[in-house]
Amino acid sequence: MTETTTSAARERVIARLVAAARPLFAEKGTSAVSLREVAAAAGVNYGLIHHYIGTKGDLLELVLQRASAEWVDYFVEAPTADDAVTHIMRPKSSEYARIVARSILAGETPEALLGRSPALAALSRRIADDIDSPSDSDHDARIAVAAITGMALGWGIFGRYVQDIAGLGDVAEDEVTEAVYALLRRGIDHR
């Protein structure tokens, strides 16, 4: 095999492992998922995790980094800042929220795994471009992104519970989620 072929094969295996780990980590938490379980879900040899990635902590770090990188691309390419904000509030984001929440509850520090989020920095830049007051736009944008992220993470984790206790159990979950996110977007738009 050539070096390029080996590198491509390695990347395919890593991508499969990350794709398999993400829903498992979200559903059970990192500590309750074995690397053998991830390998089986990915359909790869268990030893390849150690060979290509390392430890479970390394895999968690890679899952968070890849998710952030995907979001950076979207935030940069989104037609508008509102489209970028909408992206962080989609149902798929709740999977990421659950991974972060479970990691925090297990004693992990997400900032140690990810550092300052490249995705949130990209979203801050998009929002800053839309703020009229240039002197405070970076500060205001970061505060807006912190509020958006806090809401998205909170709703991603507790949304169904809050929906039920608010007497909205008879309304479709997607409908309530979209209404909550629309309300938040309106608040951000009126900064």
Image (cartoon, helix red, strand yellow):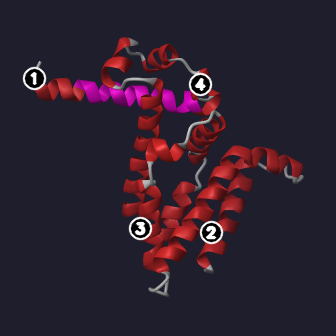
Mark closer to the chain start, 3 or 2: 3
Return the mark for residue 31: 4
Return the mark for residue 79: 3
Crowding at dot 3, Cα within 10 Å, few <14 / some 14-19 / many 20+, comes out as few
Report which residue position mark 1 lands on.
Answer: 2
Give residue 47's quadrant in the image.
top left
Q: Is residue 148 visible?
A: yes
Q: Classify mark 4: helix, strand or loop.
A: helix
Mark 3 or 4, closer to the camera: 4
Does residue 176 appear to the left or right of 6 in the view shown? right
Front-lying residue, 168 or 12:
12
What stretch of residues is rendered in magenta?
Answer: 9-25
Return the mark for residue 185: 2
Where does residue 52 sit, x and y in percent of width and height? 31, 23
Q: Determine the CA span between mark 3 and mark 2.
A: 16 Å
Q: Determine the CA span between mark 4 and mark 2.
A: 35 Å
Residue positioned 43% across, 29% down in the render: 59
Crowding at dot 2, Cα within 10 Å, few <14 / some 14-19 / many 20+, comes out as some
Residue positioned 49% across, 28% down in the render: 21
